[in-house]
Amino acid sequence: QQQVKQSPQSLIVQKGGISIINCAYENTAFDYFPWYQQFPGKGPALLIAIRPDVSEKKEGRFTISFNKSAKQFSLHIMDSQPGDSATYFCAARISNFGNEKLTFGTGTRLTIIP
Amino acid sequence: NAGVMQNPRHLVRRRGQEARLRCSPMKGHSHVYWYRQLPEEGLKFMVYLQKENIIDESGMPKERFSAEFPKEGPSILRIQQVVRGDSAAYFCASSPVDRDEQFFGPGTRLTVL
């Protein structure tokens, strides 16, 4: 029930295209869903996050789409650039005191080709 | 405002030795989390601490691993009698009170020979 399933494992997108990464969860108690970007040898960096009271959140070229009934959420990167090549992790969290650990997906390695 | 700081960045230990990993949270953050990342895998939660209190240690192995966040100084993750399977990247994250965001440090990469 604590799992977050992420797909695809790897993704190659042409420069200027749209990159889409999907995540699904089982535990309906999750109420905070962040996405992290990680470059090799670095720590994860918070990219964008959403709560289930909205269906979409956009920040620059990054958009989260959230489907509460399907228990799925996705990251869309518009106009993908070579600098976006990194590993992306979705995560989920329950916002109760003492229960605030992040449960991560297994990651998607994104490569943007010229 | 400096980010989350971790040291050392790289640590090499022989089997049976002890490893001490340090984490200084961002200024004003009182919540600290430790995660472990095995090669080519996602991050796994280990422990959540506040000053002088362990809030949730459900992800930490029962033996050889311990964590603390004293009133003064950094949070410490301690691994006693390391084995090769402990080789991983260990990340610390911090968050302020009543906020969702967790900010990660650069990690400590532990190699056990």
Image: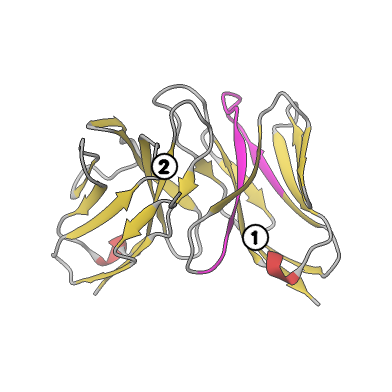
Q: Which residue is mark 1?
A: A9
Q: Is residue A11 above or below residue B61?
A: below
Residue A18 is situated, as x and y percent measured from the top left of the image, at 83, 58
Q: Is residue A30 left or right of residue B49?
A: right
**Residues shaded magenta:** A22-40
Please state the chain letter of the residue tagged with numbered disc 1 in the rendered image: A
Q: Is residue B107 left or right of residue B99?
A: left
Secondary structure state at the residue bearing disc 2:
strand
* Residue at 61% over, 32% down: A26
Secondary structure state at the residue bearing disc 1:
loop
Residue A32 is situated, as x and y percent measured from the top left of the image, at 60, 32
A30 is within the stretch colored magenta: yes
Amino acid type indicated by mark 1:
Gln
Q: Which residue is mark 2?
A: B94
Q: Is residue A85 above or below residue B41?
A: below
Evaluate if marks 1 and 2 touch, with contact meaning CB atoms under 8 Å apart. Answer: no
Label 2: few (<14), some (14–19) or many (≥20) C-alpha neighbours in 10 Å? many
A53 is within the stretch colored magenta: no
User: Where on the picture, by quarter, is residue B71?
Assistant: top left
Residue A55 is situated, as x and y percent measured from the top left of the image, at 78, 31
